[in-house]
Image: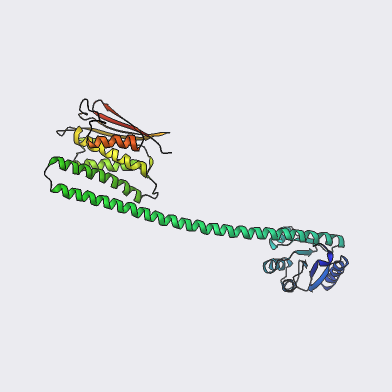
Amino acid sequence: MTSREKIRVLIADDDYLVSEKIRDIVEMLGYSVVGEAADGTQAVEMTCALRPDIVLMDIEMTGMNDGLLAAEKIQQSCPTPVVVLTAYQRPDFLEQANRAGVAAYLIKPPNPGELERTVTIALARFQDMQKLRQLTVKLEIEIAERRRAEQELQKALREKDVLLKEMHHRVKNNLQMVSSLLYFQAENEDEQRVLDILQSSRDRIRSMAMVHEQIYQSEALSYIHFERSIRSIAIYLLHAYDASTDRIHLKIDAEPAILTVETAMPCALVLNELVSNALKHAFPDNRAGTLMINFSEHEQEYRFTVRDTGVGLPEGLDIRRQGSLGLTLITDLAEKQLHGTLTVVRDAGTTFHMTFPKPV
């Protein structure tokens, strides 16, 4: 307000004499009295109808019984600065007044200077409260919009997860179907070389299918617990090659390791090749022995070792130049796809040791 004449006041007091005294002070200050309410209910109705600049309200009136309740109703229906008038101050008064949205209060009977100062403070405080309410409403709208956006995003992510799981499930089923076709093809073959090729192909496909199976069964679709895949693939290959556990002792020491799908798949193929090669060639003539698999995670790299106590590789065999398809596949996966290093140790059997860096 820039001038007193523009300040329009509604007086609410059920005591006529007090109301008249307040009117005299208000008019003496140059304010305009737009109406006088005799109870709380009337105060709310007149505030909404007359739209005064400020309401001077007794704290205890008939009707609503409590001026604070009337002040709260005013703020809910037609926000207006309210100054409550009280003959005494209860200990909990300020807290209740703040909850009701009261802009200021005066102890009865007010003098002109106190009333003028309080009205000025109340109008300024009410403007600040209105700005704060507007900011609060804006913030609530933004929060609601963000919450809706997050809910839509979560819904989209859930739908995406369902689709990805379905995709991995179908890929696993398709790989198993291919494996079955190779099995039926092998049933009609007599040449051992062809049977070996078909069996090796089935093993590789089955190992890939196991990775996809673990993916769609897990909650997270971007990575798998690879130590579980190691155990599943190794046990499957033991059964596939009819390797009795009494003859081939399997020892697995795999630390819990979370690998991305892009890393887990070539690791699973390397494991398949190393274990199947050991089962096919390391223990001829029902020779007994031990097959050890170690997988560990370090600060910058993974370390993967497959060792057997079998007959060992032929002397002078260079796995990078003279190796079988399986050995060639192992070196390509380890060095080209996983960007790691592969070393072979020929000592009381054969040890393949691979290290590869963690993805950045």
Q: Position of residue 352 (x, y in %)?
A: 29, 31
Q: Is residue 185 left or right of residue 13?
A: left
The residue furthest right is: 28
Answer above or below: position of 56 versus 177: below
Which of the two residues, 119 or 40, is positioned nearer the viewer here?
119
The residue furthest front is: 321
Q: Is residue 13 left or right of residue 28?
A: left
Is any part of residue 92 visible from this angle?
Answer: no
The residue at 24%/37% (across/down) is 326
Scheme of colours in the image: rainbow
Which of the two residues, 8 or 321, is positioned nearer the viewer here?
321
Q: In which quadrant will I find the N terminus?
A: bottom right
Residue 191: quadrant of the picture:
top left
Q: In which quadrant will I find the C terminus?
A: top left
The residue at 45%/58% (across/down) is 155
Q: Position of residue 172 (x, y in %)?
A: 29, 50
